[in-house]
Amino acid sequence: MKLTFIGNGNMAKSLIKGLVKDFEIEVYGRNTQSLNQLAKDIPSITTSVLENMLDITNKNIILCVKPNSLDDLQNKLTGCANNLYSVLAGVKLETLKEKISAKYYIRTMPNLGATYLKSMTTVTGDLELKDNALKIFNNIGSTLWVKTQKELDIATAVAGSGPAFLALIAESLADGGVNAGLTRADANILVQGLFSGFVPLLENETPANIKDKVMSPGGTTAAGYAILEQNGVRTAMIQTIQKAYEKAVELGKK
């Protein structure tokens, strides 16, 4: 299958790196310099500057532009695409159908893990395209099909934005180690190992069970955990997801 990327930002680059082994890929973008660099980094793809009146007839489009670029983009496309896969945060299927002509539509939200084939990607849209969409995005990690666009917007906050939130936690853990006396290099190694080992724990245990197994009465974990609760870390994370979800909804209204 040939995939046509429109847009070549960070998310597009991550997806392309994950998909290039299994699909023929062409990329259209606005910036000649960044397109040339992308072609240099991934020689097996083809790149072209997006000009007026690009014929998308029968193409399988992966749309990776900024949401506020959609109005301008619609004036540069002609024809009817075969399938349209959109990674535009918050942009509803109804809006996509108004702006770009295609037979079938999918909204999807991968995350930065796609670069290493470890994306957690949420997908929704036309049921006729469900199997194809999951097949494509399973190539870059795990997928979850949800029934509603509201669920996808919530998932965007959890898994789409999640790497940034976890990066803050990882950085803070390393900072704590340095503050207590570790070298920065050793603190970073410990945090990397911690996150790597945490994945199989999450796959086999609930977060509550993990916490209870680590936390012994009157121990070091209990002492540290009390500080997290005192500073409202749990509440802050809940509010973070809510605010990110609300932003996705807001973007969809513009």
Image: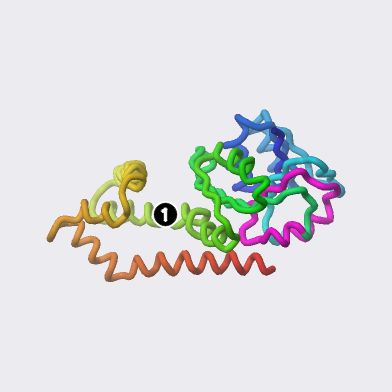
- Indicate whether residue 195 is drawn in magenta: no
Q: Is residue 191 something that shows in the picture?
A: no
Say which residue appears at 19% left-offset and 62% top-offset: 223
Q: Secondary structure at mark 1?
A: helix
- Indicate whether residue 85 is drawn in magenta: yes
Q: Disc 1 marks which residue? A: 166
Q: Residues within 10 Å of mark 1 (few under 14, many from 20)?
A: few
Q: What span is colored magenta in the figure? A: 70-97
Say which residue appears at 73% left-offset and 33% top-offset: 46
Q: Identify which residue, 53 or 10, lies in the foreground.
A: 53
* Residue 248 position (above or below residue 103): below
Kind of residue sitting beneath label 1: Leu
The answer to whether 234 appears left or right of 36 in the picture is left
* Residue 70 position (above or below residue 31): below
Q: Quadrant of residue 151?
A: bottom right
For the C terminus, the quadrant is bottom right
Q: Is residue 133 something that shows in the picture?
A: yes
Q: Quadrant of residue 230?
A: bottom left
Residue 94: give x, y in percent of width and height: 72, 61
